[in-house]
Image (cartoon, helix red, strand yellow):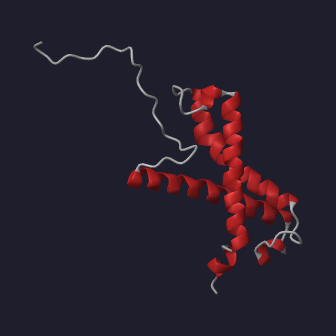
Amino acid sequence: MNKLDDLLTIPTACLIIFLVAITMLVRRFVESIWPELSTKTPVTIRQRLWELFILPAIPAVLGMTFCLIVPASVWPYYPSVASATRLSLGIYGWALGWLSASAYQQISNVLKKKWNVELPGATGNTPAPPADLPTASPPGK
């Protein structure tokens, strides 16, 4: 086995999926409390801050917190990470969180582009224009 096979194990994949699921729950909770942060509303500075900075950072913070709280005797970490310092566990969790966020974003982009399927919480939606705007008539009429 090579080093990548040692690093990407079934428990690591489960942790990445867990981080995506928890992030989706946090997103639904926050957007139900503050609906102006949802992609269904017109774009604001708060929504852009939420979409581009806070939301992608949530899985990284959750991953780091998980790896710092759960000891190596309970969770099967990568051996060289588990035997090193708490800082290495935190960095490992941070990296897994960023991996989960970017993997979710890439998968949702591919599904949207190839099959026009939107995953829950997909970003980049543009709000529909208001229906009460007058339509432009062709020139000369």
Is 64 positioned to the left or the right of 35 in the image?
Answer: right
Q: Is residue 46 visible?
A: no
Q: Position of residue 138 (x, y in %)?
A: 16, 18
**Which residue occupies 63% across, 27% down?**
35
Is 140 positioned to the left or the right of 135 in the image?
Answer: left
Q: Is residue 86 visible?
A: yes
Q: Where is residue 121 in the image (x, y as percent from the top left)?
A: 58, 43
Q: How many labels does the image show?
A: 0
Q: Position of residue 74 (x, y in %)?
A: 87, 69
> What quarter of the picture does the N terminus occupy?
bottom right
**Which residue occupies 82% across, 62% down?**
87
- Toward the left, the furthest residue is 140
Would you identify the image quadrant in which residue 9 lies?
bottom right
**Which residue occupies 53% across, 30% down?**
40
Q: In this view, does 42 lie above or below 98?
A: above
- Toward the bottom, the furthest residue is 1
Q: Position of residue 106 (x, y in %)?
A: 51, 56
Q: Is residue 2 above or below residue 89?
A: below
